[in-house]
Amino acid sequence: MLLYLLLMAPALIFMIYAQIKVKTTYSKYSKVYNQRGVTGAQAAMQVLRANGMADIPVETVQGKLTDHYDPSKRVLRLSPEVAGTPSVAAVGIALHEVGHALQHKTKYAMMGLRSALVPAANIGSTLGWILVFGGLLLMGLSQVFGEMVAIVGILLFTAAVLFTLITLPVEFNASSRARQMIKETGLLVGQEYEGASAVLSAAALTYVAAMLQAVAQLLYFILLVFGGRRD
């Protein structure tokens, strides 16, 4: 248990910081309305049309900050607050999702790689740790067999870790595209742009935190299996 706490504590602390940063930054700029009175949905539709993607529907999905682009169905979904509010934060978030749509259209390599890893990552995140701990228990009966089971678990969980690593350039690139689109369209100006950029930067921290947690968890598994630690 001590080993786990030592490895995971920094990542957990950073995750808490990232969540607080997102919450406070979004709360601040969701109350700042842009001069043009453009909602997130309107901004998304305008930029989609300008980039030859008018056929991509913009739908509303329930929840808060549940905004996402679905590449399998080519649908952009925005949370009610983002879709219907003419705030600086709403425009920034909506155009971040448009950035993902542009990645899909231009066949951005990292996005394709991340999509390909989804099945393996889902299996690894749910089954990996079960096999690791199951293998550790089986070592009491058969060292070789138990270790093999644990190694399979580590390999499966590694797929989940790779997914979090590949997610970083995908999300950073989408935010970079969003910032560029804001400048090109003039949807936000001056301090409005700075506010939207701050929201995007805060959101990026959550992906970094998720990656750090996954890496720390993987390192813990490796040390348990190969380091002779059982605490």
Image (cartoon, rainbow, N blue to C red):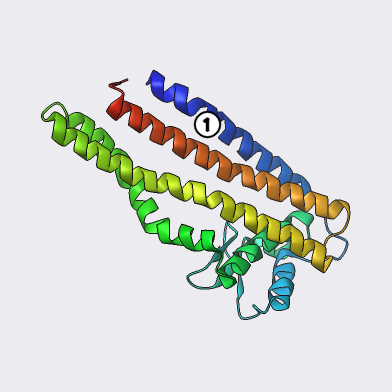
Residue 181 as seen in the image, left or right of residue 75: right
Residue 158 as seen in the image, left or right of residue 97: left
- The residue sitting at 59% across, 66% down in the picture is 103
The spot of residue 202 in percent (x, y) is 68, 44
Asked if residue 65 can be seen in this view, the reply is no
The answer to whether 103 is drawn above or below residue 210 in the figure is: below
The spot of residue 56 in percent (x, y) is 60, 76
Residue 225 as seen in the image, left or right of residue 187: left
Q: Disc 1 designates what residue?
A: 12
In the picture, the quarter occupied by the N terminus is top left
In the picture, the quarter occupied by the C terminus is top left
Q: Nearer the viewer, residue 149 or 83?
A: 149
- The residue sitting at 41% across, 34% down in the picture is 217
The answer to whether 194 is drawn above or below residue 178 in the figure is: above
| Disc 1 secondary structure class | helix
- The residue sitting at 65% across, 66% down in the picture is 98
The spot of residue 218 in percent (x, y) is 39, 36
Name the amino acid, label 1.
Answer: Leu
